[in-house]
Amino acid sequence: MKDKIEAIVEIETEGEIGLIRLAKPPVNALGVALRTAVYEAYNTLSNDPGIRAIVLYDEGRFFSAGADINDFGKADIEPTLPQVLKSLNNSKKPVIAALHGVAFGGALEMALACHLRVGATGLRVGLPEVKLGLLPGAGGAQRLPRLTGLARAIDIICSGRDVPAKEALATGILDRLFDAPVRDAGISAARDALTGTLEPKRTDALVVSEDPGAAKAARIGLQAKRPALRAPLKALEAVCSATLPIEQGLAKERALFMELMAGEERAGLVHAFFAERATGRIPERDAESRTIKKVAVIGGGTMGVGIATTLLIEAQAARIETARNGVVANLGGALSRGKLSDEGHAAALGRLECTDVLEKVAEADLVIEAIFEDITAKTMLFNKLDVVCKSGAILATNTSYLDVNEIAAATNRPEDVIGLHFFSPAHVMRLVEIVVAKKTAPECVATAFALVCKLGKVPVRAVVCDGFIGNRILTQYRRAADYLLLDGASFTEIDAALEEFGFAMGPFSVSDLAGLDIAKATRDRKTAARPSDERYSNVADLICDAGCFGRKAGQGYYLYETGKKVAPNPGAERIVEAERRKLGLTPRTFDRDEIVARCLTAMIAEAVRVQQDGIALHPVDIDAVELFGYGFPRHRGGPMHQADLIGPTKLIRQIESYATEDPQFWQVPALLRDMQCEGRSFADLND
């Protein structure tokens, strides 16, 4: 027998077993509608005297991906998820969760409230709420440790990691694994529960032993690894409260959950979550993609090796083996990290070919140029590719700054030319700026987006300008940091302030990592176009001229031993002091808040100009670039999200204040004044 409630769950009966099938595709998101339907279905079966056991399951792609993120503001609408789960937990009839695919967040919390959990062999479960600035708020932090013990629950909840099926069985999360169809497995478990073969248990009847050592070690680890984040530490507090009686623990958990719900960290992480998924809203999304079966990468340096997929072209024969070894090492790393299966690793190695014969690209569907950043070299190469490559092949340049229109003009097929700006290391970094030139065909853009998504990366559309989205903003961020350095802050103070804000590395540490000579080459290229009234800092150039190229040279702004930072470089400090004396500057002090405010305001101002100039389609695209390519703190949401939090009035006031010192650098973007006058937010421009 079947019955439907609001068309998002199905009630079935199999003799004395009642079944509730979740039916809200595509992911069975546990928002208000689904949790209400489950609650009503449960009450229907619970009140049926002919039903002795109840099974929750789904036959779609997976059980449930968890809470509906769009319903986060509706956590208190009844029935709340805690109310639903309390009913399941208190049921006098055994309730079984039959899980397959994934059961994340609220879905796992629902399963934990049941009396038995059986899982398919490929199942993954987890409580990933900390990744969104939250903690499990419907009993997960109380019920999981009652099954696994405190130490394992701390690890799972405070990291937000996935738990594979075998580990879930071994740690007590699951009571049984199955290979049968999920419905049959649920019915079998229900029958075994009724006969006593499987013993149902209520998690609220279980006791958690205190583990001060595990709690202390976790607190120290979280503070060291993610000091800017509140959610992991609050989650730890919630898990440790599982040693209390269940009602006290649930109340403590819910209070901590609601505290995080109201915080900026949660808002920033949710914004970042949506930013990753919003960048595909492009004008070309309905264009038909071209078929890509063979990809060639030209350039065997660090970037080319990181990008390479099937065919790697290196002009210098002596460097072919080095380039191949680099690709093999990257593939080996992916294998060891679980990103590639043994079969996938073997297939990738089997497809890889390294050569110095340019004509080998003739059959490639996509050619990615990743040679050094020189417009003459790139245009000469594209002129050759125009002759060698087959009709319809996409010719992509991995330039970071250069004019893609000029590169396209070197061919007779500008409609096939596009920018694919990968970020180093390309096999790890997720962002790819897709730079659309004036004559790039829509299907070329659509193909690029499809390919980048298939690679598991985040594509963001940009149009041509110097530096596109990310490097254009980075330039202004670095100028603000350089001016702070000249005016009295040390590079260690600036790095520390921005790292405390949430960046993994401050700007001077990043410069050392990237190579000071690389940035100097870009500055040298721009010298002729530099405005005469621009305040230019020579510090980075002078450090570079002294042979201090950064980490690869063992010294830059900092000193390095075996690749690890050990101390500030006294030579760099002397250069800074000498430059201040030369310019007649009297050093002044800046506290951490002002350092962050100036650097963040510079980023926001340039990000607003990027939007104003039409380089990016939407403000959220700018945030995605900064989050996934430049290490902007994920819990801060991105510069445009920060702009909305700060507000245009305060931003304008800050810029005008800084402009009294340097009117050339600090200028209020026209769009920011428009937003102030119209009372609009940048989030409004995402619609």
Image (cartoon, helix red, strand yellow):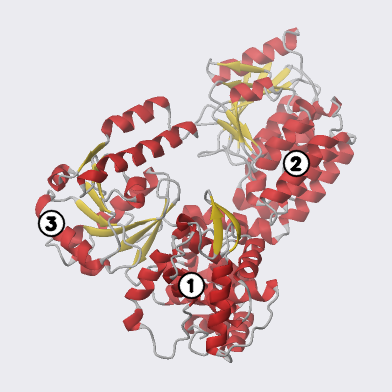
Q: Secondary structure at mark 3?
A: helix
Q: Amino acid at mark 2?
A: Ala
Q: Is residue 662 left or right of residue 446?
A: right
Disc number at residue 251? Answer: none
Q: Identify whether 555 is placed above or below 219.
A: below
The residue that label 3 is drawn on is 384
Q: Residue at 50% of width from left, 72% of height from top?
A: 478
Q: Is residue 633 left or right of residue 115?
A: left
Q: Residues within 10 Å of mark 3 (few under 14, many from 20)?
A: some
Q: Residue at 78% of width from left, 28% of height from top?
A: 149
The residue that label 1 is drawn on is 607
**Which marked residue is nearer to the observer: mark 2 or mark 1?**
2
- Of mark 2 and mark 1, the one earlier in the sequence is 2
The residues bearing labels 2 and 3 have C-alpha atoms spaced at a distance of 57 Å
The residue that label 2 is drawn on is 218
Cβ atoms under marks 2 and 1 closer than 8 Å: no
Could you say which quadrant of the image residue 380 lies in?
A: bottom left
**Count of marks overlaid on the render:** 3
- Of mark 2 and mark 3, the one earlier in the sequence is 2
Asked whether 555 or 114 is in front, the reply is 555
Report if residue 43 is visible in the image: no
Q: Identify whether 474 is placed above or below 15.
A: below
